[in-house]
Image (cartoon, grey):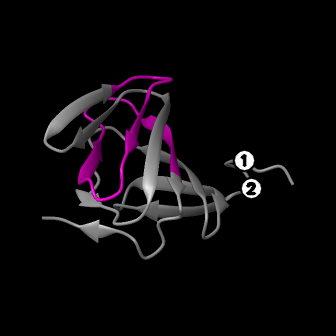
Amino acid sequence: MKISKQNASHYIWGNQCDGWHLLQNEGLSIIHERMPAGTVEIRHYHSVSRQFFFVLSGTGYMELQGEEFELETHEGIEIPPGEPHQMQNRSAADVEFLVISLPGTRGDRIELS
């Protein structure tokens, strides 16, 4: 079955951000996310899941272990298990990206202050 933003399960996170579950099972999760201008996700880590963020459009900023990485269109970054991270959109436009998690992150998110 074909999957896209148009027919994927949609959810809202952080009051303004969108997520579409393109694939979701225990072993693998692929989410297409959209962060409007000026939005920031809560800093957190995953104890088991390894993630890969890949920017589809716009520019995002990933804070990982106190270091910041600017991610432009068609750039990505791997987040190892146990590493605190935070995705941010400091631009004036939306940023859209894929979050690929192995295994899936259900029940594996630990938020930090």
Residue 44: which quarter of the image?
A: bottom left
Q: Nearer the viewer, residue 59 or 63?
A: 63
Q: Which residue is mark 2?
A: 7
Residue 84 counted in the magenta span: yes
Q: Secondary structure at mark 1?
A: loop
**Label 2 close to label 1 by CB (< 8 Å):** yes
Q: Secondary structure at mark 2?
A: loop
Residue 80: x, y in percent? Answer: 36, 49
Q: Nearer the viewer, residue 91 or 73?
A: 73
Q: Nearer the viewer, residue 20 or 54?
A: 54
Tell me which amino acid carries mark 1: Ser
Residue drawn at (30%, 37%) of the image: 89
Q: Which segment did they paint magenta?
A: 71-100
Which dot marks residue 4? 1
Residue 103: x, y in percent? Answer: 53, 62
Residue drawn at (23%, 43%) of the image: 64
Q: Nearer the viewer, residue 64 or 71?
A: 64
